[in-house]
Image: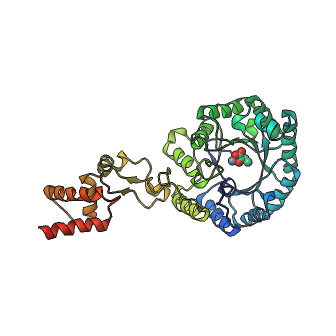
Amino acid sequence: MLHDPNRVYVFDTTLRDGEQVPGCQLTTPEKIEIARELETLGVDIIEAGFPVSSPGDFQSVVEISKAVSAPTVCALTRANKGDIDSAVEALKYAKHPRIHTGIGSSDQHILHKFNSTREEILQRAVDAVKYAKKSVEDIEFYAEDAGRADVVFLAQMVEAVIAAGATVVNIPDTNGYCLPDQYGAKIKFLKENVKNIDKAIISVHCHNDLGLATANAIAGLQNGARQIEGTINGIGERAGNTSIEEVVMILKVHQTLGLHTNINSKNFYELSRMVSAQMRMPVQPNKAIVGANAFAHSSGIHQDGFLKNRENYEIIKPEDVGFPSASIVLTARSGRHALKFHLERLGHTFDKDELSEVYQRFLILADGKLDINDDDLQGLVAARMVKN
Ligand code: KIV
Ligand code: ZN
């Protein structure tokens, strides 16, 4: 089968990098429920856990492998035989298993985490890939802290692990350090200088320490990466990971990028709420795509423009991400147009002067109240009738 060069594979790590967040730990049944929803969403790869880390994580990988059939199920390991053996065992029921093994690639990690040398680390990387390849065909290699790694050494490492059998090479910006142009340039360098790069897919795995995880992932895709790793709601270590819903909608809105995924974006809202509830991790109201305010229009100028033509202030249709609907929130910053819209929705029609009068009383009420609901509006109308 010919590989579509514009297809971006979506690798979800909500159940691994996301679940590492303190307080977000899930039981195996909860993970299975999320994994099934991820399958419905259309993700290509589910990173189900880190089997050697605990018996519970091992069992989750086993059960998720049994529960889903379309996506590849992936298990994380460090670059050693014990971890790999455990992952192979945990993945034995997976229809499409993948081992995700790797090691540090920056001098910071090589010297101060592994107390080692570039040569030794390179050998350990190659040995791990070769060992994993004996049991599983699909091997993804992660070059941890690639964001801070010397790009020439990184290219050497990537070339060696592909020669050893890696099918996907993950270039993580583990510490969320890079600027988008730096990260994009790193991916471009690998594309242009690793001579066997056409034998593997480049994957982007970005963290959000500087708020750049999504921007960096997109920069990576623009420079030749074709797999994006992320989580639902952007949860993950420290400030989190790239948010899958953001990347997918960026590719949809910016068709000129010419890239597409297999994701059914209408499932985002429901899945976002499920992940948030199960992981006890609220979604910030202003979160792009799935936050409570993502489709709420509140200032008078925006509301007036939106009511004239939604596209004045809407680049994504709420229904495209499963969001219940756009909303016109009534506050003291709302204008007459928004008030009229809500009064008519409740069945009350006023001429211009009448509306002005109700609007003045509305402003007094709204100045003392955070937002105005339908009962408040009915109260304003009733008070006007009594008065007249
Ligand atoms: O951020 C990171 O480097 C990781 C790897 C284990 C892929 O999560
Ligand atoms: Zn990570």
Looking at the image, residue 23 sits to the left or right of residue 264; the answer is right
Q: Is residue 347 visible?
A: no
Q: Position of residue 67 (x, y in %)?
A: 70, 67
Q: Position of residue 168 (x, y in %)?
A: 74, 44
What residue occupies the far front of the structure in this picture? 368
Looking at the image, residue 214 sits to the left or right of residue 193; the answer is left
Q: Position of residue 104 (x, y in %)?
A: 78, 40
Q: Quadrant of the C terminus?
A: bottom left
Name which quarter of the figure residue 22 lies in: bottom right
Q: Is residue 68 visible?
A: yes
Label total for image: 0
Looking at the image, residue 93 sits to the left or right of residue 348; the answer is right
Q: Position of residue 160 (x, y in %)?
A: 82, 36
What residue occupies the far left of the structure in this picture? 388
Q: Residue at 68% across / 53% down in the picture?
A: 17
The scheme the figure's colours follow is: rainbow
Q: Residue at 23% across / 65% down in the picture?
A: 380
Nearer to us in this view, 28 or 89 = 28
**In the rendered view, would you say 341 is above or below 139?**
below
Name which quarter of the figure residue 382 lies in: bottom left
Q: Residue at 33% across / 47% down in the picture?
A: 302
Q: Residue at 59% across / 37% down in the picture?
A: 219
Nearer to us in this view, 131 or 76 = 76
